Amino acid sequence: MRIEARQSLLLSIDMQDRLLNTIPELTRNTVIQNSTRLLAAAAALEIPCLATAQYPQGLGPIRDDLRENCPQTFAKTAFSCWRDTDIRDWLEKHQPHPQVMITGVETHICVLQTALDLQHAGWQPVVVADACASRDPGKAESALWRLDQAGIPVAVAESVFYEWLGDASHPQFRSLAPAWR
C-alpha cells in the first residue's frame, strides 16, 4: 500500500508525559521528535489529525508541543481508540481518508488494539514504528511483529513524510524537508 496525503489522517495516541516518562529516554526522545515532525507536516499539508489522552484526570493532558499542531483531542478510557464512541464518530466523519497513520504509546496496548480494530472495520492503518513506544522495548517489538503478521503495514516517520509529499517539486517540500535532516 502506498501512503497518500489526500487519503491519510494522523492519529496520535496518548502522548502524555506520565506515560512517556516510563519509556527509556533515547526512545522517548525519538518518539516525541518524530511525532512532532509528523504532526507539523500533517498540519502544513492539511491532513486531518486527532490526538487522544488516556484517562487525563489521572495521567494528565497530552504534551503541549504535540497539541500545538493537533488541537483536536479526545479523552478516552478504552485501550482501542476505535472502541470510544467520540473517536469512532470523528474517524467516520473523516472516512474519505481511509489511511490512518498511528503514532503514540504504548505500542503493545493502545496502538496495537487500535490498529487491529481499524483494520477489522475496513480502514488501512499504518503504524509508525519510530513514533511509537512501550515501557519495555521487547513488548513493542512483539507488537510490531504481531501487526506485521496481521498484515498491518509498519513504516518509519520519514517514509510517511516523503510519501505524503511524493515529489521534491511539492510546494511544501522546501519548507518542511529541513525538519527531517
Image (spheres, rainbow, N blue to C red):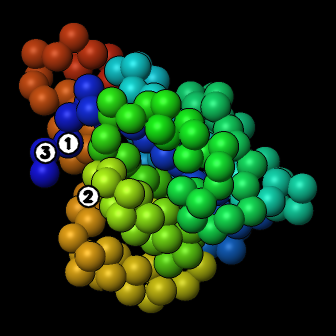
Residue 26 visible in the displayed image: no
Task: Give the quadrant of residue 161.
Answer: top left
Distance CA(mark 1)–CA(mark 3): 4 Å
Q: How many marks?
A: 3
* Residue 82 vertical placement versus 9 (above, below): below
Asked if the residue at tag 3 contacts the one at tag 1, i.e. Cβ–Cβ closer than 8 Å, the answer is yes
Mark 3, residue position: 2
Q: Residue at x 75, y 49 (%)?
A: 75
Q: CA distance from mark 3 to mark 2?
A: 11 Å
- For marks 2 and 1, give the one nearer the viewer: 1
Mark number displayed over residue 3: 1
For marks 2 and 1 on the same chain, the one whose residue lies earlier in the sequence: 1
Are circles 2 and 1 on residues that touch, CB within 8 Å?
A: yes
Circle 2 packing at 10 Å, graded few (<14), some (14-19), many (20+), is: some
Tell me residue 52's x, y (percent). 64, 49
Image location of residue 4, percent across then percent down: 20, 35
